[in-house]
Amino acid sequence: MLDATTTFFENLDRRGYEPLLTKVSGTLRFDLHEGPQTRHWLLVIDRGRLQVSQEDREADTVIGTSPALFEDLAAGREHGLAALLRGDMTVTGDARLVVQVERIFPGPSDSRGPRRLFHQEVR
């Protein structure tokens, strides 16, 4: 069984295009730190076209957090901007990409509105 993090990134890669990111281009690297080990996920966005890998290379934005917190983000149990404001995540580089990419994360199961409806339709 795959964890929510792997499922999230594999679904993005398989989707290949995200209409919510049509006006976005850039690279984000997610560094998931657990003790001495770091797991990397690289998301390349080119006007909505998505490409995902596990490369550890330069990126416009680097987001650092724990695997447990990212698991909650990917499952919709946690909100990324709230975690950032609490200091549970670090961001270096272009912080605007964080705000733009936050839209593709699932919302809480009890949320309503266009983002939640969009993610229900995609599944």
Image (tube, rainbow, N blue to C red):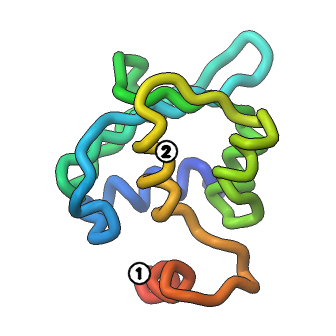
| Residue occupying image coordinates x 72% and y 81% | 109
Please tell me whether mark 2 or mark 1 is closer to you in this view: 2
Q: Residue at x 26, y 52 (%)?
A: 24
Secondary structure of the residue carrying numbered label 1 = helix
**Where's residue 95, x and y in %?**
48, 36
What kind of element bears circle 2? Answer: helix
Q: Label 2 vs label 1: CA separation? A: 21 Å
Q: Is residue 51 above or below residue 8?
A: above
In which image quadrant can residue 35 be found? top right
- Residue 122 image label: 1
Residue occupying the point 69% across, 83% down: 111
Q: Viewed as shown, does residue 63 lie left or right of 36?
A: left
Q: Amino acid at mark 2?
A: Val
* Residue 112 seen in this snapshot: yes
Callout 1 environment at 10 Å: few (<14), some (14 to 19), or many (20+)? few
Amino acid type, mark 1: Val
Which residue was labeled with disc 2?
98
Residue under the point 75% across and 59% down: 78
Picture layout, residue 20 above or below residue 80: below
Give the vertical position of 59 relative to 16 (above or below). above
Q: Where residue 107 sits: x, y (%)?
A: 64, 72
Nearest the eye: 99 or 64: 99
Closer-to-camera residue (110/86): 86
